Image (tube, helix red, strand yellow):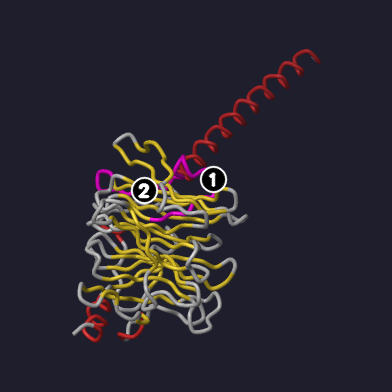
Amino acid sequence: MNDIIDMVRSDFVKKVKIVFVFLLVITMISCEKSNNNNFPDLSGDYLGQILPDSNAILFAPEIISLENRLESKIVFSPDGNTVYIQIYNNDFMSTIYYSSLVDNKWSEPIEAPFSIDNNIQLASVSVDGSKLFFSTNVRNQNKLYSVNINAEGWGEQEILPVPYNSEAGDSSYIETADGNGFLTSSRDGSAGKDIWMIFKTDDNELQAEILNDNINSSSLDFSPCVASDGSFMIFGSDRFGRNGLARLYISFYDEENGWSEARNVNSSGSQINDDYANQANPTLSPDGKYLFFMRHYGTYEMDLYWVSTSFVEEIKASVLP
């Protein structure tokens, strides 16, 4: 009799184990599917987000701009089909994620392999879309690099030569369609951080030149965003005693007078700068219709915003004759 009871118990235990394993497998599959579905189905330009007007709004809330995460910069490829996002982790190490539009659906952002554990800061994408520019910390100095973008993903990384890089810190590099470059630098001649231009001389030699005091000031001036045709620049500055709470400013270029005196981007009436926040890292959408930027309220509150660039022409009309 005891043998029979033992056999029944053994059979029962086996069945319970089988059921437990089955439920465990189902749970794991369900969790995996749930994790894979955390990123929503998104299609269309700019991840299908509602377009902004003249008042800046949060970009892609709960999708790209997340609570308890520090998003610092966003750059779209020239064709608008790939987006690159700079994110800081809890140790304030910076990395780059990217997402692509494939079959009219945006992929879940993944970390760029070259940026993993490398404290990399996003700069810009070349006008032809073939290179991504970034900076990374080398011996406590920011150095500028480029990495090729190809059909297979990523190509070789290359450090940019002198005078793009200097013995000081260099970052936020961007090029115009004619090949002129602009960057943030602390090199000799700078008042802390200033905006410099890299261009070719008549002898086809590269030369670095600090921009005049219509753009640079005795405060920190940084993160230039230059229109691809070189007609205007938007940048961050903590001038007028802001001491770390930068606003965005705009300056216009014409051949006769050079760069115009910088104006606060809010001077048109658009609500872009928040005086209680730090604004920086401006970038333009591929079609030039929208401005993206970082807004930073405190140590652990940093998000991406965007706004219509209708303010550009409004300010230009009051600046240029």
Residue 286: x %, y % from top left: 25, 59
Nearer-the-camera pick, 217 or 6: 217
Nearer-the-camera pick, 47 or 211: 211
Mark 2 → mark 1, Cα distance in angstroms: 16 Å
Q: Which quarter of the rendered picture does the N terminus lie within?
A: top right
Q: Which label was assigned to residue 118?
A: 1
Nearer-the-camera pick, 190 or 50: 190
x 21%, y 84%: residue: 317
Task: Report the span colored magenta.
Answer: 102-123
Badge 1 amino acid: Asn
Circle 2 residue: 132
Q: Quadrant of residue 25?
A: top right
- Asked if residue 162 is positioned above or below residue 72 in the image, the reply reads above
- Asked if residue 108 is positioned above or below residue 52 in the image, the reply reads above
Badge 2 amino acid: Leu
Residue 201: x %, y % from top left: 27, 56
Residue 183: x %, y % from top left: 40, 61
Q: Which quarter of the rendered picture does the C terminus lie within?
A: bottom left
Q: Quadrant of residue 228?
A: bottom left
Other residues around mark 1 within 10 Å, as few (<14) / some (14–19) / many (≥20): some
Q: Quadrant of residue 48?
A: bottom left
Q: Are marks 2 and 1 in contact (CB under 8 Å)?
A: no
In screen coordinates, is 294 left or right of 153? Answer: right
Residue 289: x %, y % from top left: 24, 68
x 68%, y 24%: residue: 12
Q: Residue furthest right?
A: 2
Q: Which SS class for mark 1?
A: loop
x 53%, y 73%: residue: 297
Q: Which SS class for mark 2?
A: strand
Other residues around mark 2 within 10 Å, as few (<14) / some (14–19) / many (≥20): many
Residue 252: in magenta span: no
